[in-house]
Image (cartoon, grey):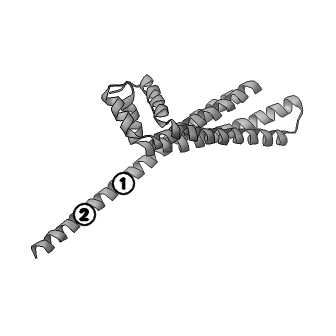
Amino acid sequence: MDDDKKQADKRIKKSETSKKNSKKKKSFFYSWTFKVIIVSFFLTAFFTLLSEMTVSMNNIALIAVIILFIIAVGIIFDVVGVAVTSCELGPLTAMASRKVKAAKTAIMLVNNAEKVANFCGDVIGDIFGIISGACIVALAAKAATGIGADERILMIILSSVTAAATIGGKSYGKGVAIKRSKDFVMLAAKVICFFKKEK
C-alpha cells in the first residue's frame, strides 16, 4: 500500500511539474512573440523611412547600392541565425574558461538560439525583403525614365536578379555557417561586445 501511495504521489508531482513547465513555455512564447511584433514594427518603420528618403533623391546609383547592401545584410543575418543553431557549447565554454573576449556573449547567443535565429532569419529577413521590393520598384521606375525602357520588364529583371542573389547567397552561406559555426558565432559576439561591454 505504501508503495502505491508513493507512486501515486510521484505521478501527481510529475503532473504538477509538467503543468508548471507548460505554463512557463506558453508565457515565454507569448512574451517573445509580443516583443518580436513591437521590434518588427519599429524596425520596419525606420528602414522604410530611410529607404523612402533615399529613393526620393532620384539617384539611381545610390538606390542600386542600397539594394546590394540590403541583400548582403540579409545574407549575413541568415548566416548568423544558422550558425547559432548549429554551434556546440563545448568549445565556447572552454574559451570562456580561458577568459577569451566575447566567449560569454557567444554562449549567451547559443543558449538563446531560438530567439536569435527567429530575429536574424525571420524579423530581419522579412523586413529587408519588403524594403528591397520597394527599392526595386523605385529603381525600375527611375531607370525606365532615364533610358526609355519598359518599366515592367525592368522590374521583372531586377526582381529576378535580386531574388536569385538573395537565395543563392543564403544557400551558400548556410553551408559555410554550419561548417564554421563557432567562428561566425564568435564574430557576432565580438560585434555585440563592441557596442556593449561583456559582463
The amino acid at mark 1 is: Lys
Residue beneath label 2, please? 14
Residue beneath label 1, please? 25
**Residues tagged 1 and 2 counted as in contact (Cβ below 8 A):** no
Find residue 15 and report its horizontal and vertical position in percent: 26, 65
Instruction: Examine the rendering and report whether any part of residue 52 can be seen.
Output: no
* Numbered label attached to residue 182: none
User: Of discs 1 and 2, which sits in the foreground?
Assistant: 2
Q: Quadrant of the N terminus?
A: bottom left
The answer to which quarter of the image holds residue 123 is top right
Q: Is residue 168 above or below residue 9?
A: above
Q: Tell me which residue sits at (47%, 26%) in the image.
A: 191
Foreground residue among 107 and 72: 107
Q: Tell me which residue sits at (54%, 43%) in the image.
A: 121
Mark 1: give few (<14), some (14-19) or many (20+) Cα within 10 Å.
few
Q: Quadrant of the C terminus?
A: top left
| Side (left or right) of 158 relative to 194 | right
The amino acid at mark 2 is: Lys
Q: Tell me which residue sits at (75%, 42%) in the image.
A: 160
